[in-house]
Image (cartoon, rainbow, N blue to C red):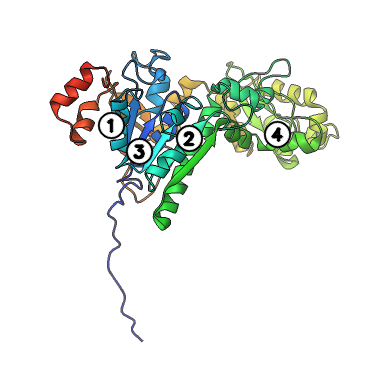
Amino acid sequence: MDHTTDHTAPDRTPQPPPLEGITVVGVEQAVAAPFATRQLADLGARVIKVERPDGGDFARAYDTSVRGLASHFVWANRGKESLALDLKDPRGRELLEQLLSGADVFVQNLAQGAAARLGLDAASLCARHPRLVAVDISGYGADGPYAHKRAYDMLVQCEAGLVSLTGTPEAPAKAGIPAADIAAAMYAFSGVLAALLRRGTTGRGGPVEVTMLDALAEWLGHPLYFGMYGGTPPARTGVAHAVIAPYNAYPTADGQPVLLSVQNDREWGRLARQVLGRPELADDPAFATNVARTGNRDKTDRVVGEALAGMAVEEAVRRLEEAGIACARLNGVTELAGHPQFAARDRWREVGSPVGPLRALLPPITLPGSAGPELGNVPALGEHTDALLSALGLTSERIAALRRDGVIA
């Protein structure tokens, strides 16, 4: 038997980004499609963003909070090349068709019916370009009574029932983030990855369809089943929990609330003894079980709140953690931006933009052994138009003529 040991050192050369070599074209606006294609850019894809010459993606004008740039646009559009192209002009559509002949993925979230009128719906594109993965993102889908209904994020949150679940018993509230847009974006992102994997074995791309209503309804699976089979929908409880107590935010001596969650009766015993200083409550029939505590929610919240109100936030968090009780500070976005966990894990980078360097968080997907993501810049409108059209073989004279005619910017 050969007992020779292989002393060959493992190859530690970083692997390339997983989507290196993939070209994505997005006729996109607002959040859903741009956020989906930004995920692809973060994984190494080349993303070409096609925008209207007269102002571009309307999300560019939502606000001016990021040194004059719009916060939505900065968030959803780093790492892209901007091509300002009028798709209503036949010359613009011809140029887009040339671009698509060398692309791997196409994503659009135009108003329902607009892409089809331009011949840019997924089915039509895949018939012309069999290897292309083409994604249609819409509010409600291509058919049905809601097909042509306007589908802004807040409206879909309402139609999907999310708003009915969010807020206080007195008043519903929409989510503080564009949840319907983000849900659709992430299913479009994963749909593209699945379709590219299938293309690797079949050689064919194909259409991908994602609707905001479908995506958000999937996220509401727990309350949907609770309501369908439990007879009543979950109650709105603010930051409390409908079926667990204590599970709420409680003020501390210095005013900063702490949210804590007791998941079982053993944890309640530890909370009573080690944090509240009330060991008798561990076995008190009014508090000993979660059923009892939720039935006596007001009393439960009162005894917890009274104890934490006498502690500074740091002491409250320390004692809760020492007792093994899940807890969190009730941070705002300012605290999130300075969160110590991001600093400890080196999660911040800088990206370029038309107004200079901006902070950007690394994408949530980490692939150990791969080259770290190169976070691209936030593009100015039409910043890459000339370079992209030159690469298609257009002369400088033709590019200038198209610009004079308003076909490009």
Considering the numbered disc 4 on the image, is that residue within a helix, a strand or a loop? Answer: helix
The residue tagged 4 is: 223
Callout 2–callout 3 Cβ contact below 8 Å:
no
Determine the image quadrant of residue 62.
top left
Q: Amino acid at mark 1?
A: Leu
Seen in the image, is 275 located left or right of residue 124?
Answer: right
Question: Where does the image place residue 288, in percent across and percent down from the top left?
Answer: 81, 37
Residue carrying label 1: 95
Q: Are marks 4 and 1 in contact (CB under 8 Å)?
A: no
**Where on the picture, by quarter, is residue 176?**
top right
Q: Count the marks: how many?
A: 4
Q: Which residue is mark 2?
A: 136
Query: In this image, 47 relative to 291: left or right?
Result: left
Percent of width and height locating residue 271 = 70, 34
Of labels 1 and 3, earlier in sequence is 3
The answer to whether 24 is drawn above or below residue 156 in the figure is below
Q: Nearer the viewer, mark 4 or mark 3?
A: 3
- Residue nearest the viewer, comparing 357 with 162: 162
Q: Which mark is residue 24?
A: 3
Distance between the Cα atoms at labels 4 and 3?
A: 36 Å
Q: CA distance from mark 4 to mark 2?
A: 28 Å
Q: Secondary structure at mark 3?
A: strand
Pick whichever of labels 4 and 1 is earlier in the sequence: 1
| Circle 4/circle 3 CB separation < 8 Å | no
Residue 391's disc number: none
Front residue (pair 254, 257): 257
Residue 101, above or below 172: below
